[in-house]
Amino acid sequence: MAFSATYTFTFSLEKTESMTRLAMKRSKLFIIVLVFGVLSIAFLTQLGGRTRNMPVESSTITPSSTTSLPQPSLTTSSSLTKLVPGLFAFSQYSNELFLTPSVTMNYTITITPIDNRVSGDVALSAASPVSGVSILLEPKGFTFQGAAEAIQVAISVAPSVTSPTVPVNILATTNLGIANQTFTFSVERERIVVYPGSTEFAKPSVLHVSTGQRVTWFDSVDIDDDGNGYVNVVLSDGSAASPTMARYDLWSHTFDKPGTYTYYVTVLGGGSSSGSIVVG
């Protein structure tokens, strides 16, 4: 019995000593790992601090300086180059839109704002896909001072133009984009325009037509507050005469026989001038 007790005690003691040595090894290993981790963190911290202070990094744009730079607005810049419907209403009040070769026609176009976001200056331009057409706008830009703005459009077409119609596109560039309107003008070759003036009232003063063609006179003279401006056209041979014409009125006469016909244009309160029709 004593031997058995001694054996048991010895086994337990050796086992205890073995466990103690194992625990001490684990403790030492834990301490080594802990020290190594602390040293690593300290080293990395110092390295990071030196990196932020290196001269090469001082020339790099920091996030704060980047956000302070002005950035272009892609939406605004793109809207200025695209057509935006519903900005303006374009209107004109002539009974007929036409052009006569070598004669400058003057029309008034009214621009009325629809979108109340339009502000600032409005730049105007005009173009036609037909070559040989000259267009002059007056003014070339404006700022709305009231409910609408009127612009004068002077258009002439060269005798070489063969197209029966001439489209003219009016563009208005605004802070929101571009508004546009296309007006189509007919080309009338056998037409004489009566203008207000001091010496010459009819253009062209000489018109060449074929036998059997009809010639039309167009009155563009405005009537003033005193009633001056009414127009009469009379052929010198007494074969035909127009009724009294007001602005935008038309009068036509067909020339059935070859020859040269002289006519007189009288503007009430403005005098008279003459022209000729060469029929052949």
Image (cartoon, helix red, strand yellow):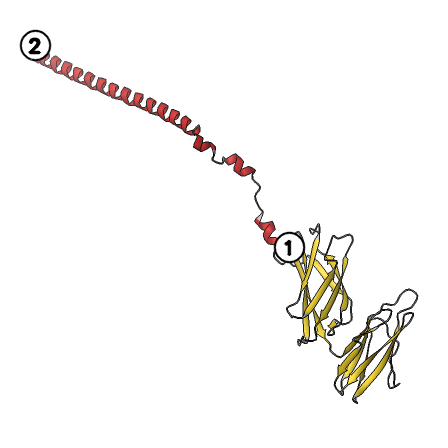
What x and y, as percent, mark residue 162? 66, 77
Question: Which quarter of the figure is the N terminus placed in?
Answer: top left
Q: Tell me whether circle 1 and circle 2 mark residues in contact (CB < 8 Å).
A: no
Task: Decide if residue 272 is on the left or right side of residue 109.
Answer: right
Residue that numbered label 1 is attached to: 177
- Distance from label 1 to label 2 (Cα)? 111 Å
Instruction: Kindly give the residue lying farthest to the top in the view shown.
Output: 2
Q: Which residue is found at the position 56% from the left and 37% from the top?
A: 68
Is 55 placed above or below 210 here? Answer: above
Judge by depth and name the residue closer to the eye, 31 or 262: 262
Q: Which residue is found at the position 57% from the left and 49% from the top?
A: 74
Judge by depth and name the residue closer to the eye, 265 or 243: 265
Is 184 placed above or below 20 here? Answer: below
Question: Which quarter of the figure is the C terminus placed in?
Answer: bottom right
Dot 1 falls on a residue whose secondary structure is loop
Residue that numbered label 2 is attached to: 2
Marks 1 and 2, the one that precedes in the sequence: 2
Amino acid, disc 1: Gly
Is 259 placed above or below 204 here? Answer: below
